[in-house]
Image (spheres, rainbow, N blue to C red):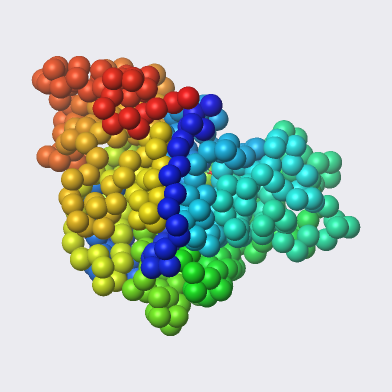
Amino acid sequence: MAATGWQFAGKEPDAAKPNIILINLDDLGYGDVGAYGATALNTPNMDRLAKGGIRFTNGYATSSTCTPSRFALVTGVYPWRNKDAKILPGDAPLLIDTAQATIPKILKKAGYATGIVGKWHLGLGDGNTDWNKEIKPGPNQLGFDYSYILAATQDRVPTVYIENTRVVGLDPNDPIQVSYKENFPGEPTGKDNPELLKMKWHHGHDQSITNGISRIGYMKGGAKAKWNDEEMADLFLTKAQQFVVSNKSKPFFLYYAMQQPHVPRTPNPRFKGVTGIGPRGDAIAEADWCLGELLKTLEKEGILENTLIIFTSDNGPVVNDGYHDDAVEKLGSHKPAGPLRGGKYSLFEAGVRVPFITYWKGTIKPTVSDAVVCQLDLLSSLAHLAGQEAKGLDSQNYLDVFLGKSKKGRNELVIEASSRTALRQGDFVMIPPYNGPAVNKNVNIELGNAKEYQLYNVKTDVGQLTNLASSQPEKLKQMTDLLNEIQKGSPKRETGTIKLE
Ligand code: NG6
Ligand code: CA
């Protein structure tokens, strides 16, 4: 098992440590934010962070899908080292070994109060979860003092909230059952009961129905506990605000994992139509508002200047991800990926290069940074900020880059998409040959698969249009060798961070 051999060096907790809020959106694209070039929708609060902080132009998730991306973010280990780090069903067991290093675990040792609010999607339980009992292990066993989460995604059952291992509002006389294999007799599905749907499915998403929206997976019972999709954003915001207010006297770490703009897009009616580019844009506007409200809370409590805020997204954008929700029809000129090629699920840049902003009023000087930074490195960097050190992981300490004291980011980064890997090194990206379709036709996204090697200079050719593989064979060979070496965990490597047990 990867990375249980991490070492931890602790110092005494220090009261002067800043609060840390990590905001991770779900499927927000590089081009979805005003500060990153969006003009068809307004994101004033995201822009406020970008303009008052560091806007990274080369900020990366490690993966172009959620579970592997979040696995790396929380553990500081590359997702391709764990064969189970793939998009998980809602009844999957906890993906992270409870002995593994995690951001909350390290910060807790440094004296932080730790909480997560929002989307989890890293599995729960030991493989035989009874949703009517304590659901563990989960975030509370990985270092979070407090958790208020949805188990997987908004489009997967169980469609209920879980607070500190318990389903919220569960009526014991209406127990919850979940299956990803077969339906429960007599329960309606999106496939068989289209008359019950207010949002039609396009591909997948034809199973159990909650609030007129059919999901992935089957669920029975728990009627009173089911969430209201349109109220989800307000509820998560309230829980995030409550966590901040009740922990303002100690340093706290809040992982605020907003569910927008993942499908099903269900912005509160207050946001319906505000952007004119359909529900995907409206969901982003809603997320932006939530961010603004959270900033107001920090200001009101007088702690904005003592709080480091990191704003990012788990993977790139997708417009049609399985529902007929008008997102394609109303998109107009908006480009969720900005100038990048591909999107969610892709090995091309739009899969993994995401909005990435660090903001710390009064401490971080506003700037734009072209340094390559990755969510993988937040674990070591935040550990460092809190006076701790975690060794033996892929995660490296780039605190100076995240705080704007240096613009020397990562030289090399392995990116992943559905178990395929590619390498960014310096200005270049090398994608090895992969079988499989060039385009996922359901979602209309180029996946990066090709029979030949691909090599792009993403500084001069950010849209990855000119394949340099045949004109730069030496560079190609050097990068192919390097990718192999990193993936094998070669002991020759100087960094000492690619160490496995
Ligand atoms: C896919 C789903 C997609 C989305 C994705 C996970 C189908 C056809 N598609 O399998 O809708 O749920 O998984 O998204 O079921 S992620 O952001 O959590 O990675
Ligand atoms: Ca996602």
Q: Residue at x 29, y 71 (%)?
A: 361
Q: Residue at x 46, y 35 (%)?
A: 6
- The residue nearer to you, when weighing 213 against 108, is 108
Residue most toward the right? 173
Rendered image quadrant of residue 211: bottom right
Q: Is 439 situated left or right of 222 in this image?
A: left
Q: Is 316 situated left or right of 245 in this image?
A: left
Figure disc tally: 0
Whether residue 109 is visible, yes or no, is yes
Q: Residue 139, position in %: x, y?
A: 60, 50
Residue 385 vertical position relative to residue 454 in the rendered view, above or below:
below
Residue 466 vertical position relative to residue 134 in the rendered view, above or below:
above
Q: Residue at x 33, y 73 (%)?
A: 305
Residue most toward the front? 12
Q: Residue 244, position in %: x, y?
A: 51, 71
Rendered image quadrant of residue 385: bottom left
Q: Residue at x 67, y 57 (%)?
A: 164
Q: Residue 183, position in %: x, y?
A: 77, 39
Whether residue 440 is visible, yes or no, is no
Q: Residue 319, position in %: x, y?
A: 42, 49
